[in-house]
Image (spheres, rainbow, N blue to C red):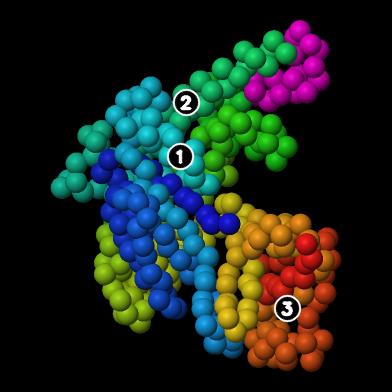
Amino acid sequence: MSLQCGIVGLPNVGKSTLFSALSSAKAEAANYPFCTIEPNVGVVEVPDERIGELVKLVNPQRIVPTIVELVDIAGLVKGASKGQGLGNQFLANIREVDAIIHVVRCFDDENIVHVEGRVNPLSDKEIIDYELQLKDLDSVEKKLMKVEKAARVGNDAKAKAELEILLQIKNTLLQGKSVRALNLSDDEKAGVADLQLLTIKPVIYVANVDESSILNGNPYVEQLKAAVSNENAEVIMVCAAIEAQIAEMEDPDERSLFLGEYGLQESGLNKLIAASYHILNLITYFTAGVKEVRAWTIRRGWKAPQAAGVIHTDFERGFIRAEVIKLADYVQYKSEAGCREMGKIGVEGKEYVVQDGDIMHFRFNV
């Protein structure tokens, strides 16, 4: 499964600069190519040192890391929920992504005009929230009309339960809050999945700061953190100007030295991908052989058959067992054969919960 994140933000907050910088980034440990599949979509390989360790040991013919798709979603204006500007396109694009990366301007610069005439990250956030909430409210109210009738006329227990959740969502939206603040259960989310609610999606707020604030932040960042504390959202600081310079550097050592000058351990791209995996509860497992070393992204908590299914549906349908090697053992004993000789290959059944970093080989029959 691939991860798709939509980058949103008001005009002149640094959204396009950040997208251009991140989507042209090169790998930290290997060659991380970028390709454009549409004018506003970039594909970036996920930095993961573990795949590099496997490659050194296996020396495969092909290396396939996991990817993240970054979607530069059209800029938003007030009234987008009613179709103003590129509103309809903006909202349709958000429905397609797994998570929202909301870029918020947290820097002063009189040479960069703010669309609202002032720098106010909380107001910027509220403009986009308001438009998304209005669209969700419209969707909820339309469904409520149908569900209320079913719950009243047919005395339908399922409809009554659905009605309760819909009313809860409606009241939350009317209070100016996003649906994700409700912390709905997986079953409750499944019950309203047909609505494709926009404000239920996980959000990573990217505080775009100036160079002087990249380490310790500034009052704008603190205001943003306080405002989103009840949303279960991620907040990371990135300086789009620094990222733009990093993107021009081909040599990994040169990039490391450049980051070190600012006291940074990693690039904004790495922080953003890590935040995306965390907020979406994703992990990575590997398959390793002389033909190919590949990383696979799955949901944390998935069992072995589900994990096998991301390779091919036949793997899940005909699952027999999984052979599992821990990465530390693979590194210590240098090969699959070495792990087998030392008894370090676990044979797991359908109930095995895959762990982050597992190296897996599936047995199946269809």
Judge whether 193 appears above or below 312 on screen. above
| Residue found at x 49% / y 51% | 4
- Around disc 2, counting alpha carbons within 10 Å, would you say few (fewer than 14), some (14 to 19), or many (20 or more)? some
Residue type, label 2:
Lys
Name which residue lies at 76% across and 57% down.
Answer: 317
Q: Quick check: 307 left or right of 97?
A: right
Instruction: Give percent across and percent down for residue 341.
Output: 79, 92
Work out whether 168 lies above or below 281. Answer: above
Q: Is residue 166 magenta?
A: yes
Residue sticking out furthest to the top: 153
* Image quadrant where residue 349 sits: bottom right
Q: Are marks 2 and 1 in contact (CB under 8 Å)?
A: no
Q: Position of residue 244 (x, y in %)?
A: 28, 62
Q: Residues within 10 Å of mark 1 (few under 14, many from 20)?
A: many
Q: Point out the tag, 3 or 1, that comes first from the N-terminus.
A: 1
Tag 2 and tag 3, C-beta contact below 8 Å: no
Do callouts 3 and 1 mark residues in contact (Cβ within 8 Å)?
A: no
Q: Which residues are magenta?
A: 151-168
Asked whether residue 183 is drawn in magenta, I would say no
Residue 111 appears in the rendering:
yes
* CA distance separating discs 2 and 3: 47 Å
Residue of label 1: 94
Q: Which residue is mark 2?
A: 135
Residue corresponding to mark 3: 325
The count of marks equals 3
Q: Secondary structure at mark 1?
A: helix
How crowded pointer 3 is (Cα within 10 Å; few <14, some 14-19, many 20+) is rated as many
Q: Image point 42% across, 34% down: which residue?
A: 91
Q: Is residue 216 above or below residue 220?
A: below
Q: Give the residue type at disc 3.
A: Ile
Q: Nearer the viewer, residue 207 or 84?
A: 84
Label 3: which secondary element? strand
